[in-house]
Amino acid sequence: MTAVATPSAALDKKDRNKRRPRTPAEWILLVLAILGAVIIVFPMLLLLLNAFKSPADYANSSPLDFPKALDFTGIKVFWETQNFPHALWNSVFISGMVAILAVVISVLNSFAIGIGRVKGRTWLVLVFLMANLVPQEMLFDPLFRLYDGLGLLSNPWSVIITFTVIQSAFGTYLLSSLLGTFPKEILEAAAVDGATRFRALRSIIVPVIRPTLSVLMVFFFIWTWNEFLLPLAFLNTNDSLTVPLLLEQLNGERQTDTTTLIAGTLISTIPTVIFFLIFQRTLTRGITAGAVK
Amino acid sequence: MKYRNQAFGALVAVGALTLAACSSSGSSDATTGAAADGDYSGQVLKVMHYEGEDSAMGIAWNRAIEIFEEETGATVDLQTTAFEDLNSSASQLFDSSDAPDVSEYNKGNGTAGQLAAIGVIQNLDDAYAEYGWADKLGAGVDTIAMYDENGVMGSGSFYGVPNYGEFVFLYYNQDLLDEYGMEVPTSMDDLEADMQTFVDNGITPLATSAQEYPMGQLWYQLALSQGDRQFVNDYQLYENPVNWQGPEISYATETISDWVSKGYISSDASGMTAEDAGLQFINGEVPFFYSGSWWYGRMLSDITSFNFGITNWPGTTLTPGSGGNIWVVPVESKQPELAAKFIDITMSPEVQALLGESGGLPVAADTADITSPDAQALIGLFNEVNDRDGLSFYPDWPTPTFYGDLNSVMQGLVNGQYTPADAESELQNYYESYVSTVQ
């Protein structure tokens, strides 16, 4: 259905006349888009509906009911018992460092592999990809012992180092194939003008692939933000927790204080929404970058 | 140009933060030295647990921390964590530089037993001898504190100290019983007659869940009501082979199947979680709910529209239940001596009474110290079980995977996939495939 609808909708858009009514295909697309948005917003709505219920209200009503009265117990308990600002800072610090470091390393690696065309580059890329392919459960114990020996447990740098390596492995893979197709002529022209290799990287390659680098950085940030297992292993003190770990702390052995958990989840989505609002242009620009040359 | 500046700025930031991080991690273990007798000022004890701030244990242990700091002059670095977190990381964490000096940990063969067997938690025999904890713990409660060299509980050395107990009993809706003119059931015949009356009036009488622990515990309770202590020892401690077609288990399986067909248990139970079943009771939809003392505080606070009561399961001397989670001292603890002192304070009458007063089940409290009627009702019921030496642990303890196995068989029994005989032989397969490896 959509496959048929898409080209005709694109066609319509060109000579769109404001008075002309929407075609059936457009209507179908519109309905599908609304449905998609509803499905995506639904969990957020559930959070909003239930975060403001008192525990008794929550127990006595269905999750889809409106709260009987606005109740801030969940939010208050979450705010008072958990050090959310600190966890937020930890998450931002870790994810931000990983995003920056991993992109820098990816660019340097892929410069060697993609532009420098070192010997055995296919195998090199494959080796890099291994870092992504190895299940994290396998890394759990050896890395734990390594950081224990280095005295880095409960230190954000244990997580930053680990994920800089893992994310830059993916970045190297992606950028290497991108730089493999980088027009030689531009580089040759630069060399004729007397640019050193580093100058070529800094002043020519990086500006050209900047949209891709921005997207990569945003993705690294989000992926690292959502990481759970390895941070769980490495960060064991209350003041080193990240946001996902903090939320996990609210789960009890046999029972969970559901309203507090919901309130905490709601609060923890706010920074993510802000982050998205700031970077949404980068994201959409980066996704379409390279589509048209 | 703009980009260059950004990149440079980022690198400077990274460098600065690296230095900051290094300097903060350098000076953390200055407290390792041995202390002079009695004076521990300047020392730090790192305590870890996963009880909520407002839970009975959280309240009591906060008091214990105050007393400890007063008595020893040391300070406590309290780290709270989550049950699941510690479960997945303890075997590494307790053997690392990040290890707490004393920690709460999950009791049982698969958890504390395993850690004891691989030597990640310390043997506490000497501390037990010094502080006399063994005299404070009743039989049945102390089973979960002892583990042998294979990590099987009930014998061997002490590795943990339980602070509280827990057990499983019947919650009932007093208003619904009154409405149909019933008394609190004191025998199985009463209970079945009551349930029949509710079914006749279109009410499902018993809330339970086969997706999680409640139905497995009900099944075990039914088996226990026909068994004696030797049955428990055989089932839990592998003393003799369990007869899966014997009177205890066949009674349990057949009764469940019978109750499902009579409508005492809704066939929806196979898809319900413990939370769903508990909510049915809290909402006043069902008159009976068979589950544990861990629900009690929640029932007191969340049930507003009717009166509820608690009673032990009718006609049984054995009851599912055990000591609660235990204090353990990790092998990498820097302060084992202070850890033992701290544990001793949590066992003191004052802290134990506070634990009971706050809705928990103290293991070493003087009942005279407890004044709240709600707390007295629960502790009274628990004492009744202990007086008949009734604590019989939980059905899923014998094997590491029996929790899931039992739930899936219970689900099969409820939705008619298994006959009682099928269910028994399924359970037997699961149980024996593990137990044959330890015997």
Image (spheres, grey):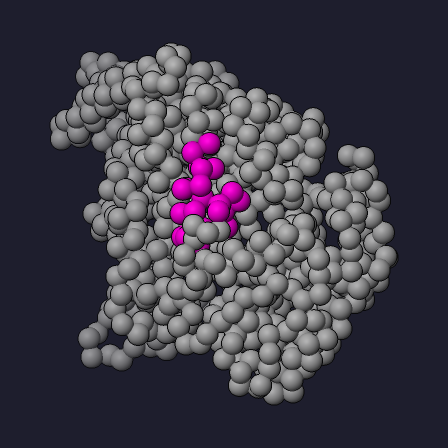
Task: Look at the picture and state if A47 lies above or below B133.
Answer: below
Task: Decide if residue B158 is on the left or right side of residue B363.
Answer: right
Q: Quadrant of residue B263?
A: bottom right
Q: Nearer the viewer, residue A209 or A229?
A: A229
Q: Position of residue A184 (x, y in %)?
A: 33, 25
Residue B268 is at least partly visible in this image: no
Left or right side of B228 for B363: left
Q: Is residue A153 magenta?
A: no
Quadrant for residue B98, please give it: top left
Disc tally is 0
Residue B284 in view: yes
Judge by depth and name the residue closer to the eye, B351 or B116: B351
Q: Quadrant of residue A53?
A: bottom left
Q: Position of residue B21 (x, y in %)?
A: 27, 22
From this view, report whether residue A250 is shown above or below residue B255.
above
Q: Position of residue B293 (x, y in %)?
A: 53, 56
Tell me if B191 is positioned left or right of B228 in this view. left
Region rendered in magenta: B344-366
Instruction: Identify the residue at image location x=43%, y=20%.
Output: B335
